[in-house]
Image: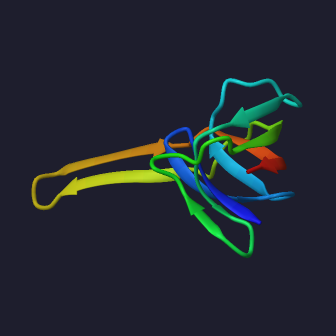
Amino acid sequence: MYVIVEIAGQQFKAEKGKRLFVHRLNAEQGSVVDFEKVLLVDNGKTVTIGAPTVEGAKISCEVLSHPRGEKVIVFHKKRRKGYRKRNGHRQDFTEVLIKSIVA
């Protein structure tokens, strides 16, 4: 069984026991967070598509940690003008573990 769920503006395929890296959530490490924006439910036999969400469906996740992503280098250059600009960025993530799916 899996579901497609929207978490912090992004869509993820969630299965029980799977770990996801989502954008930083305002939740303490070790706490349980529920997400109710379930867009699709597939239980192996039938597929239920929400319009826009599936009624009564939700997932429960446990917050494991708040890591940071790899560094991304942003480099701008205009040729023959002597213009170069280098900048770096590290995205903040939250690692969650899918505990249960209610559909």
Name the foreground residue: 88 vs 83. 88
Vertical order, 29 against 79 (above or below): above
2 horizontally vs 86: left or right: right
Name the foreground residue: 71 vs 41. 41
For the point 27% across and 52% down, the residue is: 76
Name the foreground residue: 76 vs 1. 1
Count of numbered badges drawn on the protein = 0
| x and y percentages locating residue 51 in the rendered image | 45, 50
Quarter that holds the N terminus: bottom right
Vertical order, 49 against 37 (above or below): below
For the point 62% across and 38% down, the residue is: 92
Name the foreground residue: 65 vs 63. 63
For the point 72% across and 75% down, the residue is: 45
| x and y percentages locating residue 17 in the rendered image | 87, 57
Vertical order, 46 against 7 (above or below): below
55 horizontally vs 10: left or right: right
For the point 73% across and 51% down, the residue is: 103
Colouring scheme applied when the structure was drawn = rainbow
| x and y percentages locating residue 58 in the rendered image | 71, 42
36 horizontally vs 62: left or right: left
| x and y percentages locating residue 33 in the rendered image | 76, 32
